[in-house]
Image (cartoon, grey):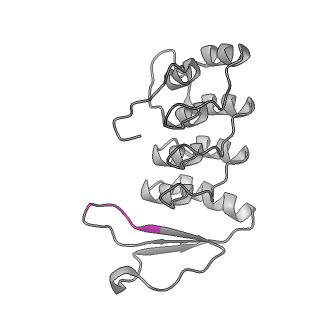
Amino acid sequence: MDEVTVLQMGGNSLLKAVWLGRLRLTRLLLEGGAYINESNEKGETALMVACITKHVDQQSISKAKMVKYLLDNRADPNIQDKSGKTALMHACIRGAGGEVVSLLLENGADPSLEDHSGASALVHAINADDKAVLQHLLNACRAKGKEVIIITMDKSATGTKATKQYLNVPPSLEFKDGAPPEACTAA
């Protein structure tokens, strides 16, 4: 989903309830038989939508509360949408915060999964410049016994970072244009 977020609901009431932050309606829909891991045409599930949404009004609940409710009701945090992104990746990209990321990790979200562009939640957290979320992800990798090496190259002309992650695999020391990395974090 691009910066101007447009959710494709495809008639899915559960996704709309989650998007709007309506916990009671979400609960009623799930109790009425709605499938918690059903997705829209982009492959986005209710859990992903909870991590993406920025909608706030007087009736909305917090993003973390909705994520917790969905996880407590067996939402799968490792389902990938059509671009390969998981709820954890969406949370990192959209700045959902440490509480949401912690909930996802505590409920089995895999920080090492990669999307179709080869980026993991770790890479998305670095590119979003979210140090607190990155620390949660690094701690989760350490807890699973995975050593993480992240190399961020200089920004491109468009302002995007070239970031690579290595889990238990040493990187080759060949850098694009022979330039050394701008930052290297080994955990």
Residue at (66% x, 46% y) in the render = 78
Q: Quadrant of residue 160?
A: bottom left
In this view of the protein, which residue sits in the foreground, 11 or 151? 11
Tell me residue 186's x, y (percent). Answer: 58, 74
Direction from residue 146 to residue 119 in the image, left or right: left
Q: Quadrant of the N terminus?
A: top left
Q: Is residue 56 above or below residue 68?
A: above
Q: Is residue 166 above or below residue 7?
A: below
Residue at (66% x, 71% y) in the render = 147
In this view of the protein, which residue sits in the foreground, 159 or 186? 159
Residue 106 falls within the magenta-colored stretch: no
In this view of the protein, which residue sits in the foreground, 34 or 103? 34
- Mainly helix, strand or loop, the magenta region? loop
Q: Which residues are magenta?
A: 158-163
Residue 160 falls within the magenta-colored stretch: yes
Q: Quadrant of residue 75?
A: top right
